[in-house]
Structure formats: structure tokens, C-alpha cells
Image: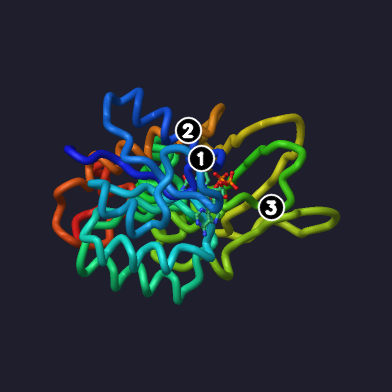
Amino acid sequence: MDKGIGISGIAGRMGRLVAEEVAAAGLKLAGGVDREPGEGRWADIGALAAAADVVVDFSHASAAAANARAVAAAGCAYVIGTTGLSAADEAVLAEAARRVPIVYAANFSPGVNLVLALAERMAAALPAEAYDAEILEMHHRQKVDAPSGTAMAMGRAVARGRGHPLEGHMESGRDGHTGARTAGAIGFAALRGGQVVGEHTLLFASPTEHIALSHRAFDRRAFATGAVRAARWIHRRQPGLYGMADVLGIAPPA
Ligand code: NAD
């Protein structure tokens, strides 16, 4: 990479970590943009994209569509980790991906993406009538939603492996006289406490054996490292919309 990596949302929690990880990887930082001007910041994302090989974006969903258009107009590769994009935003991203290569992922942790790929394969291999799938997650006490987005992604991966949608198969928030477990249900349980960054376990429980897949995140840096890995991977690729599974080489054949 000659020009280096530019960062949208460079003053944010993720943006700062990505800047550190760019330096740690021995890559060049092409500056950034944020809501306020500052040292090393460009006036707008178009100027940043013109000065960078790849723009990594961890800013805000409200900026995603305009950012994707500007980056594509500059012919720059794009890695976007911002979450909460609407279907319309995602359509703009898909359009921009006709002109430039884009990696879009709601979770850049290599570990979580591997767990999702394995969860799907395990669910496809283990018959749903015999192997009850249960997902247990724990997060810090400030978290306001449950189950977590990653727990939901695990549930969707299990459902995909079983060849049906998650909807209609989800059992969460069990309390009181719930009756026996429904065959083929995908169960969810959430613990909240302390400062846990994110812990997820997927258990397949049969009458004769248990098999569990666990992931623990200790540090948001896992996402920044993954984003820099995605930026290196996307540089000089053909235009297209890619995911973290493509970056890690674990995407199922098209
Ligand atoms: P943050 O609030 O700490 O940082 C966001 C930064 O973007 C701020 O500095 C803000 O000023 C800036 N910003 C907002 N709107 C902007 C705009 N229009 N133009 C330029 N800059 C703008 O948030 P964060 O924790 O760093 O997370 C940022 C995003 O990344 C969120 O959507 C979050 O959910 C997502 N995220 C994704 C992953 C992943 O693995 N994909 C991991 C962590 C966070």
C-alpha cells in the first residue's frame, strides 16, 4: 500500500484503536475524518478517500450511505464496520460495491466469525431432534438489549445449518411453567454482570453427549485487528461486496 489506510470516525473508540493497529502492523496512516476538525484530519471523506488506498469506517449509520458514495467516487477500497445500517443504506453499499471492493461486517473479530462458520456446520451435521441447541451469553451490566447481536447471529447460523429461518424456532427468556422443551428449538439465555466484554457458548446437548463452542472477547481491539486485516485483504481486489468470512477464507463456495 503506497498511500495507506484512512479512518472515518478516527476520534471514536474504534477509530483510535484502528489507528493504533495500523501503526502496529507497520502500515501507513493516511489520516482520517471525524465530526470535528483536528490534526491529521481531512476536510471531508472525499478528500480522505483520494489520499488513501483503503478507508476504514467506524463512524455512525447516518453517515454510511454518503460515505460509501464518496469512497466509490474516489475509486478507493472500503472497509465498513459501522452497525445499524438500514436496508436503504445497504442498497447504497451494494451499488458502491459495483465500482470498488468493499468489506462490510457487523463483527470483525476473527474468532466470532470462525465460531459462526463452525456453528452452521455443526448444526448441519447434528440432527435437530437429538441435539438440543442452547446459546448462553454474558455481557457487562450496562448492556440494554438481550439476546446480544452475536448470540442472534449464532442462532441464525444454527438455523441456516438446519435449513430453516431462526424465526419460529427461537426459545428465549424461559421463566415459570414453560412446559417441556420443543424439539428443534434454539434456546437462548442471557447473563448480565460486571464488565464482561462478551462471552458466548453454543451447546449441542444430546442424551449421550454434549459438544460446546465458546468464544470470549476480552478487548475491543479484536475488532480493530480484524478491520486492519480486512483492509490489507481488500486492497487491489476486484470490485464487490465481501464479508469477514471471505477475508478469513472460510466462506462457503458460492
Ligand atoms: P464512537 O461513538 O466511540 O465513535 C464514533 C466516531 O465517529 C466518533 O468520533 C464520532 O464523532 C464519529 N462520527 C459520527 N458521525 C460522523 C460523521 N458523520 N462523519 C465523521 N465522523 C463521524 O463509537 P464506536 O464504539 O467507535 O463505534 C462506531 C461504530 O462501529 C458503531 O456503529 C459500532 O456499533 C460499530 N462497531 C462495529 C464493530 C465491528 O466489529 N464491526 C465493533 C465495534 C463497534
Answer with the quarter of the image where residue 174 lies: bottom right
> Element under label 2?
helix
Estimate how packed mark 1 is, as few (under 14), some (14 to 19) or many (20 or more) residues with alpha carbons within 10 Å.
many
Q: Nearer the viewer, mark 2 or mark 3?
A: 2
Residue 172 pos. (x, y %): 69, 56
Quarter of the picture holding the N terminus: top left
The residue that appears at 51% across and 40% down in the rendered structure is: 14
Q: CA distance from mark 2 to mark 3?
A: 26 Å
Q: Is residue 251 left or right of residue 207?
A: left
- Asked whether the residues under the numbered discs 2 and 1 touch, taking CB atoms below 8 Å apart as contact, a structural biologist would say yes
Answer with the quarter of the image where residue 167 lies: bottom right
Q: Is mark 2 within 8 Å of ligand 1?
A: yes
Question: On the image, numbered disc 3 is attached to which residue?
Answer: 146
Q: What kind of residue is marked 2?
A: Leu
Asked whether the viewer can see residue 154, the reply is no
Question: On the image, numbered disc 1 is attached to which residue?
Answer: 14
Quarter of the picture holding the C terminus: bottom left
Residue 142 pos. (x, y %): 75, 42
> Element under label 3?
loop
Q: Earlier in the sequence, mark 2 or mark 3?
A: 2
How was this image coloured?
rainbow
Q: Nearer the viewer, mark 1 or mark 3?
A: 1
Q: Is mark 1 within 8 Å of ligand 1?
A: yes
The residue that appears at 53% across and 65% down in the rendered structure is: 62
> Element under label 1?
helix
Question: On the image, numbered disc 2 is attached to which residue?
Answer: 17
Q: CA distance from mark 1 to mark 3?
A: 23 Å
Q: Is residue 253 left or right of residue 111?
A: left
